[in-house]
Image (spheres, grey):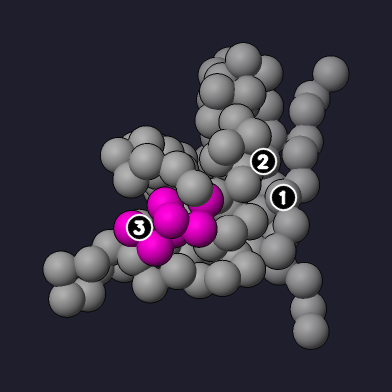
């Protein structure tokens, strides 16, 4: 089975814009551009805020047990549903979790096995 990975990086706004401009120029010249996907934060502090130990724990639980609802996830994590819901919605907002709604229940899914961290120096 192939391991699916998600890339997380820390990159300044200036660096991201510079990369965007280079990519746009390459496309304009008709060059093929390598598709790059991932989740990027503007600072180490923003990264730490996003991936707290509690949120990493939720990602593991979602990946391993695929809970049918956020209530089930909260029970498995031994955490309050309100806090779990806030954390999962934040993780969805930054692109690390997919949310699905069915029969008045919201469930979360993770489509990767590993998180790769990339920090420019």
> Residue 70, position in %: x, y?
35, 58
Closest to the observer, 33 or 114: 114
Q: Residue 54 appears in which quarter of the rendering?
A: top right
SS for dot 1: strand
Q: Which residue is mark 1?
A: 115
Closest to the observer, 62 or 21: 62
Point out the tag, 1 or 2, that comes first from the N-terminus: 2
> Residue 98, position in %: x, y?
42, 60
Q: Is residue 12 above or below residue 39?
A: above
Q: Is residue 29 above or below residue 65?
A: above
The segment highlighted magenta reads 71-77
Q: In percent of the image, x 63 and y 23: which residue is there?
A: 48
> Residue 66, position in %: x, y?
50, 71
Q: Is residue 99 left or right of residue 8?
A: left
- Are the residues flagged by discs 1 and 2 in contact, CB closer than 8 Å? yes
Q: Which residue is mark 2?
A: 8
SS for dot 2: strand
- Which label lies toward us, 1 or 2? 1
């Amino acid at each position: 089975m192939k391991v699916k990975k998600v890339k997380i990086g820390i990159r300044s706004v200036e660096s991201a814009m510079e990369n965007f401009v280079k990519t746009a120029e390459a496309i304009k010249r008709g060059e093929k551009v390598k598709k790059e996907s991932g989740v990027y934060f503007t600072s180490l502090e923003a990264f730490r805020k996003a991936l707290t130990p509690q949120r990493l724990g939720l990602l593991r639980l979602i990946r391993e047990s695929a809970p049918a609802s956020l209530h089930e996830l909260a029970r498995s994590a031994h955490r309050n549903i309100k806090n779990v819901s806030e954390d999962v919605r934040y993780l969805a907002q930054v692109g690390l979790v997919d949310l699905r709604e069915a029969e008045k229940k919201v469930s979360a899914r993770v489509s990767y096995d590993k998180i790769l961290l990339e920090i420019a120096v």
